[in-house]
Image (tube, grey):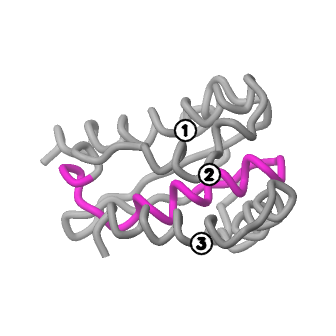
């Protein structure tokens, strides 16, 4: 699936949820599905600055694609970062750089978040793009 298709699938999933309590629970459930994040990757280099909770994102470049792994010490940020991992992992650096983050507003996530959590989300999205730029330069 393309990034756009992943985003559209997520938008559709959220459209079936009636209120923010259900959306909140769904985001938390998605976070529980994240693969284990190795303790040795929980280093300052992978720590996202600007998040209220600790959030780590790591990327691996394999077969022309970026694969993300992430974790957080907070249940909501872990769910939020899991959305980004789900959408962007397994795509080329160029696909990631060409993509946008408009799905965030389409699912209403920014309206739901406190200002500090919204800043954290913005920091996470910037890190995803940063990895894409960094690995594209290494090609």
The residue under the point 55% across, 38% down is 124
The residue under the point 65% across, 52% down is 40
State the residue in front, 138 or 7. 7
x, y percent for residue 125: 48, 39
Q: Quadrant of residue 3?
A: bottom left
x, y percent for residue 88: 40, 58
Circle 2: element type:
helix
- Decide: few, some or many residues near mark 2? Use Cα within 10 Å; few <14, some 14-19, many ≥20: many
Mark 2 and mark 3 in contact? Answer it, CB < 8 Å.
Answer: no
State the residue in front, 105 or 119. 105
State the residue in front, 138 or 96. 96
Residue 51 highlighted magenta (yes or no): no
Mark 3 and mark 1 in contact? Answer it, CB < 8 Å.
Answer: no
Which of marks 1 and 3 precedes in the sequence?
3
Distance between mark 2 and mark 3 Cα atoms? 17 Å
- Single out the mark in the foreground, 3 or 1: 3
Q: Say left or right for 92 vs 84.
A: left
Residue 79 highlighted magenta (yes or no): yes
Range drawn in magenta = 70-95
- The circle drawn on residue 13 is 3
Outermost residue toward the front?
Answer: 18
- Decide: few, some or many residues near mark 3? Use Cα within 10 Å; few <14, some 14-19, many ≥20: few
Distance between mark 1 and mark 2 Cα atoms? 7 Å
Which of marks 2 and 1 precedes in the sequence?
2
Residue picked out by circle 2: 81
- The circle drawn on residue 124 is 1
Mark 1 and mark 2 in contact? Answer it, CB < 8 Å.
Answer: yes
Q: Quadrant of residue 126?
A: top left
């Amino acid at each position: 699936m393309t990034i756009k298709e992943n985003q559209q699938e997520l938008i559709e999933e959220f459209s079936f949820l009636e209120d923010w309590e259900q959306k909140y629970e769904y985001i938390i459930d998605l976070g529980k599905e994240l693969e284990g994040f190795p303790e040795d990757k929980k280093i300052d280099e992978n720590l996202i600055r600007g998040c209220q909770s600790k959030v780590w994102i790591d990327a691996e470049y394999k077969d022309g694609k970026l694969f993300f792994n992430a974790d957080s010490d907070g249940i909501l940020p872990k769910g939020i970062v899991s959305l980004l991992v789900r959408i962007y992992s397994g795509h080329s650096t160029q696909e990631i750089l060409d993509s946008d983050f408009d799905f965030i507003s389409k699912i209403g996530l920014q309206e739901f978040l406190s200002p500090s959590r919204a800043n954290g989300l913005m920091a996470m999205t910037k890190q995803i793009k940063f990895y894409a730029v960094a690995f594209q330069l290494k090609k």
